[in-house]
Amino acid sequence: MINVQEINKAAELLAQGDVVGLPTETVYGLAASIVSEKGIKKIFSVKERPFFDPLIVHVATSEQLDSVIAEKNEALDCLTKSFWPGPLTFVVPKNEKLNSLITSGLTTVGVRMPDHPVALKLIEKAGPLAAPSANKFGKTSPTTAAHVRQEFSNVLVLEGGSSQVGIESTILGITKSKEGFDLILHRPGVTTLAQIERALKAWDLKYRWLERDSKEVETPGQVKHHYMPKVPLIVVDEKYRMSDLHQLIQKKIEGKFNRIQELDLPHEGHLAARLLYAELRKQAESGADALVYYYNPIRFVSDEWKGIADRLTRAATLILDWNV
Ligand code: TXA
Ligand code: MG
């Protein structure tokens, strides 16, 4: 999988302030060097992403982690040892030298070590990389190099196969407090809260969960309409499976829906996550006017499915009977 020449070429482009398509185990990223302001600005312009949406920094070594954060703490030590490389991003106080364009002016930085040999090789060579998912702002994330090339024809994309996790990393905020550690789940993913708690308990660390502050600026990763396919997605409680869907949606959304395509996902969470974005893209391009996903309300709130349910509901134009 590792093509040294391609990696050298990518490192050269990054050093010149260009962006590169980066395979990771979650989704493909659009990467720039954290020390190139030109490259960082290019990420935002190529993606048509607003500057208030902070980027995640990707590192390959613990020295690189040290260089982007303010200081280490025991919870970070414990969780990096337990879950890195892997699909878990930490939001922690940033190193003051880190370019604030990356963090959208926040005092914290999102940082993770991806579990992908090509990404790790490139980061070892080129240094830490800022990388959002490699899709136009608000659209479905890419899980293959071909997805990225379709959207950004002028960008070098490193080949890394299909992303094995399939949805973006879990994002966890960590703040040291008097009693222990305050944790905030900024975005659910395949690394679950139960796994995080188990790791902290094994290290005898005290923690409590805090709600995300609703006054906090809503970054687009958190806004409702994100990950959207080319045609409307309607997410419907499976108890309506036998009903006339046209009738159900006609009153709610405009347009003619002659061909509604059903999105089918495996019940097992890891498999569903892996297939989600590729299926959304494929079905949206199949000539359908709309997609429908019938959800099982019990599965949808399970720990395993939390990240998938989050993406499906944000990608949806209409949700029928959500939260019953
Ligand atoms: O799996 C992933 O995390 C992928 C791959 C490429 O690594 N990256 C990814 O990046 O999903 P992106 O840009 O699509 O999502 C980044 C989100 C932001 O929208 C924001 O919600 C959150 O990460 N974020 C980043 N820095 C943050 C910070 N300092 N405070 C709060 N949220 C932050
Ligand atoms: Mg994204």
Image (spheres, helix red, strand yellow):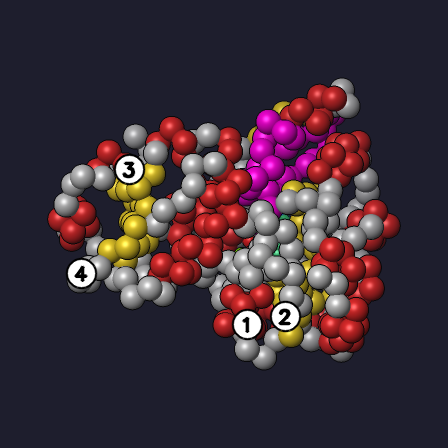
Please identify, in this view, whether the residue under mark 3 or under mark 4 is nearer the observer: 4
In space, the residues marked 3 and 1 are separated at their CA atoms by 35 Å
Return the residue at label 4.
Answer: 258
Image point (31%, 57%), residue name: 232
Identify residue type, mark 4: Asn
Q: Is residue 296 above or below residue 219?
A: above
Q: Position of residue 67 (x, y in %)?
A: 83, 53
Give the secondary structure at mark 3: strand
Residue on which the image places disc 1: 149
- Quote the CA–CA distance across marks 3 and 2: 38 Å
Query: Residue 93, position in %: x, y?
Result: 73, 45
Mark 1 and mark 4 in contact? Answer it, CB < 8 Å.
Answer: no
The disc, 1 or 2, on the residue closer to the chain's N-terminal end is 1
Which comes before the other along the chain, label 3 or label 2?
2
Q: Position of residue 294 (x, y in %)?
A: 31, 42
- At 40% from the left and 56% from the top, the residue drawn is 280
**Which amino acid, mark 3?**
Asp
Residue extending furthest right?
A: 63
Q: Residue at x 18, y 39 (%)?
A: 242
Q: Are marks 1 and 2 in contact (CB under 8 Å)?
A: yes
**Secondary structure beneath label 1:** helix
What element does badge 2 sit on? strand
Q: Please indicate whether residue 281 sits to the left or right of residue 23 in the image.
A: left
Magenta residue span: 168-196
Distance from disc 1 to disc 4, alpha carbons, whole Å, reads: 31 Å
Amino acid beneath label 2: Val
Q: Is mark 3 within 8 Å of ligand 2?
A: no
For ligand 1, tell me if the residue under mark 2 lies within 8 Å: no
Lower position in the chain sequence, tag 1 or tag 4 = 1
Dot 3 corresponds to which residue?
Answer: 237
